[in-house]
Image: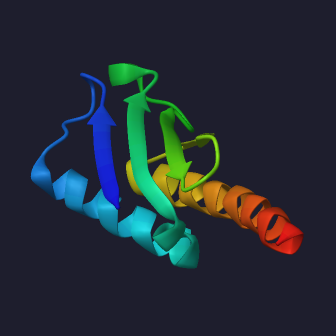
Amino acid sequence: MQIKINTDHNIRGDERLKEVARTLVEQGMGHVLNRLTRVEVHLQDENAQKGGADDIRCMIEARPEGLDPRAVTHHDADIEAALRGASKKLRALLESDFGKLDSKR
């Protein structure tokens, strides 16, 4: 399974950030991770240098095996919180999708 991290020009997408993002996404996604082929993370600082509450936007798109891609967005005050929030939302969404799929089998 591949995890790709994308950032806008306001967030420095260095190796440290990529490693932190991978770790938080893997932890947040839990057991559904093994049913995905690819995960794309998009981080954006919506207010740039202005600052402000909840200005970090994290959008995560997952490509589950046998299903259409699913995506969620979460806004928070810092990058790590945004990653945790989006991962949690996506895990809940995918658990629901997989639960429905598994019950049909």
Residue 90 position, x and y percent, is 63, 55
Is 61 drawn above or below residue 55 in the view shown?
A: below
| Residue at position x 30%, y 35% in the image | 6
Q: Nearer the viewer, residue 28 or 38?
A: 38
Q: How is the image coloured?
A: rainbow
Quarter of the figure with residue 97 = bottom right
Q: Residue furthest bottom?
A: 31
Is 15 drawn above or below residue 8 in the view shown?
A: below
| Residue at position x 27%, y 25% in the image | 10
Q: Nearer the viewer, residue 47 or 8?
A: 8
Residue 59 position, x and y percent, is 51, 38
Residue 40 position, x and y percent, is 40, 43
Residue 86 position, x and y percent, is 57, 51
Q: Nearer the viewer, residue 33 or 80?
A: 33
Q: Quadrant of the N terminus?
A: bottom left
Is 99 drawn above or below residue 80 in the view shown?
A: below
| Residue at position x 63%, y 63% in the image | 91
Is 68 drawn above or below residue 95 in the view shown?
A: above
| Residue at position x 53%, y 67% in the image | 35
Q: Residue furthest front?
A: 105
Q: Quadrant of the C terminus?
A: bottom right
Tally the marks: 0
- Name the side, left or right, on which 12 lies relative to 80: left
- Name the side, left or right, on which 74 lies relative to 59: right
